Amino acid sequence: MRKLHIVSAVSTLGLMAGLAHAGGHMASDMTLVSWGGAYQQSQINAYTDPYVAMNSGVTVTWDESSAEAVAKLRAMNEAGNITWDVVDVVAADALRLCDEGLAMEIDANDQLAAAPDGTSAEDDFGDLLVGDCFIPQIVYSTTFGYRTDMVPAGAEAPNDICDVFDLETYPGMRALEKRPINNVEWALLCDGVAKADVYDVLATEEGQEQALAKLDTIKDSVIWWSAGADTPQLLADGEIFMGSTYNGRLFAAIEEQGQPIGMMWDAQVFDLDGWIIPEGLSDERKARALDFVYFATDTQRLADQAKYISYGPARLSSAPLVGQHASLGIDMAPHMPTDPNNAANTFLYNYEFWADYRDDIDAKFQAWLAQ
Amino acid sequence: MSALSTTLTRPALLTFTMPIVAVLGACFGFVTGNIFGQPWIGFLVGAVIGAALTFVLAQVPQISRWKATWGTSAAFGAAGLVFGGAGGLVGGTVVGLCLGWFAAWIGSGQYRAGVPIYYTAGQTLWHNAFLFIAGLVFFFLVAPLVPVMWLSFNADDFFTFTPEMLAFKAEGYSLKHYRNFFSGGGEPVKGLLFGSVIGAALGAALQLLPDAERSFGKIIVLAIIGALIGVVVGKMWGLAGAEWMTPLKNSLIIAPFATLISVSLGTLAAIGLSQSHVPFRQWIMAIMISPMIVPLIISATGMFFFYAPLGNWLEANLGLSQSFVGYVKVILAHAVLGVPFVIITVTATLVGFDNSLTRAAANMGANPVTTFFRVQMPLILPGVISGGLFAFITSFDEVVVVLFVGSAQQQTLPWQMFTGLREQISPTILAAATILVTISILLLTTVELLRRRSERLRGLSPG
């Protein structure tokens, strides 16, 4: 009996030592944070698979936590235990993290690759380098998809943002994101406000009331989504007639899954998504993170990502390299939100406005939702 | 009872059987009619079919109930096939089964079989209504699993019953979500061979022990167990970055260690707390049980801030790697959650434990450790095992604490299901759920069969 106990104790110790050894070499582990789904898959295909092929011995762990990146990084910082190495966030979150000192400042010319023709990284990314910490990756847009088989007989397919608010011509449920951003802009646009004045109007109390009043006209026909996967699922189920979501999700549902869904690009809202590196990493980990980001945001890599998902690369020099979808073989350019045919009427996410007004309008919007 | 049930009489056809079955037929007709947008026409047609069915069955009273039921089912299925294809076949068979069984059951007077002959109509009705409600409870417990399992064979990447699925066409179904679940990982076949050889060798070695009972069966059983473990270990070997296999591997690392710790500590705590001379027993017990009562999110937040500096200290001073420390943190946190279950079940078994046995053992010269392992442990083992099962399931199912305490390297299966459900709504989650349910059912069935076998061998129960 005693012998057995000694044996089991020794084997437990051995196992623990084995575990400790398995995770031994620090700088070779890298935890990347992203959004999951087709988007993360495109990053695996375009960035990490070639990176690991070039740097054997590096293991990459993915964490699908970008949605709560700000809260989690705050908590990690407070606890003094940063477990993430490179984090994929939208530009607005990157600005917040940068302001709070949770993200590392990046010198684009020094720490990012120059374009093949020698253009500096700063010029290649241009205006998209918002803030001091953000390393842009893609331009995506929030836009509408609709069920092609549910368009009422005799009506045209919806092609105007105000069709969202037109319950008479296009009856049926809509899916809108459960936050004011984008929704209030669309509401004002369809309530007679000129595009140039939207943010001036929204800055006033009456303007906010006006936007909510317009949304009130369709409130009973709206399902509110909070994850990017919700709208494609609802469209596939036929539970909604139209809904907003990220254009890449719609591309996947239409082209890869063959769902009867059409795109309505009118008044799409561009936004940026990219990497940040958390502040407070050890030198070894920081070096690995910077090395990865240098590789993953060069001209060719950004163009490669567009083979797998219909988001526009953030570098000017990548645009001409965008080719065909890796498995479907269709040209990707017409599916990009930045394609001239799709970009007739667009918004760019207004970082300054929403930084100032987000909390206030958020509170009003949530109160209105609960009514 | 059987003597009473031989006197069953067939109830009146026109005033009793026919209207009742017609009502059920109308219900089915209403549902079926709804699919075609004509619920009330369906209602009428259903009522007529129900009445006609009872009439037909009444003409052939000599055939058995089961023949009547399956005959109706086959007839309805055939009709469904003619009108609605493969989907109609399945729908018709199911509806025919229900309606045929019901008509035969009512028509033959069998509904009084379970009650004494002196029961009034009201009492009989209540007796059968009660059985019906019990069946309904069972149905609502189990039914939600059926669409999950069904949808896991979807050929689409959405949680949607496609028209092809509903029509039972082959192109509507696929195993791709299962392939996706099992993708990645090492060498299950090698693991199987190694595991079975090692298991068989272990079994053979056990035969060589001086006081062993010689049995060939043991070698086989150990080889099978070894093969099963070998498949899992082989599949997990050298695994990195697989979407589902890595979380499964993490769950299989974390849950057993957490269970081991909870069971050891919980059993000792329960034995200590059952001694009457321990001061403040109720208070200590309350604190030990508290992880079960405190909302999980609060425990999780507390644990996050408690384990973070501990982990930092381990990394800085003992030179342990971040991922190893991460596992330690999650295992400790899960062990804390599992302890209350072990304490409760072991305390419950200790209530029936006769303390004079330990005194008798001491009287014969056994030290406390020997007494514990040779006398007390075998008697409270059922409580320890069921507590351990609870602790294991707690860890295996836990998502909140691991999200807080763990990092992505310790991503467990529930974590992956949680984020997957939120971010991508992929039916692979359903495949994972189906596999887990199947494994749980097999595990519990095996445990129950083994328990019955050992009871039979020990002569505790007749069969």
Image (cartoon, rainbow, N blue to C red):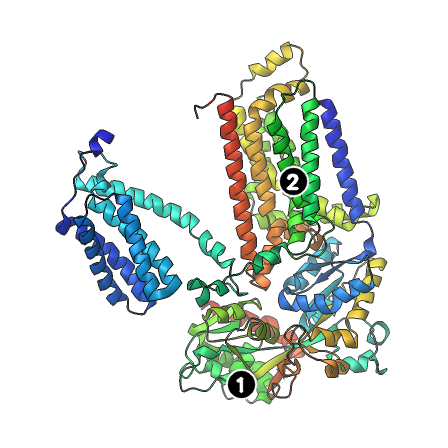
**Eyeballing the image, is B28 above or below A206?**
above
| Left or right: where A328 falls relative to A314 | left
Helix, strand or loop for disc 2: helix
Residue B1 seen = no
Location of residue B360 in the rendering, given as x and y in whole percent from the top left corner: 60, 12
Helix, strand or loop for disc 1: helix
Labelled disc at residue B279: none
User: For the N terminus of chain B, which image quadrant?
Assistant: top left
User: For the C terminus of chain B, which image quadrant?
Assistant: top left
Q: Chain of mark 2?
A: B
Q: Marks 2/1: CA distance?
A: 66 Å
Write down the residue under mark 2.
Answer: B227
| Left or right: where B295 falls relative to B74 | right
| Left or right: where B456 falls relative to A252 | left
Q: Chain of mark 1?
A: A
Q: Amino acid at mark 2?
A: Ala
Residue drawn where x is 48% and y is 79% of the image: A148
Among the 4 quarters of the image, the one containing residue B344: top right
Closer-to-camera residue (B242/A263): B242
Labelled disc at residue A189: 1
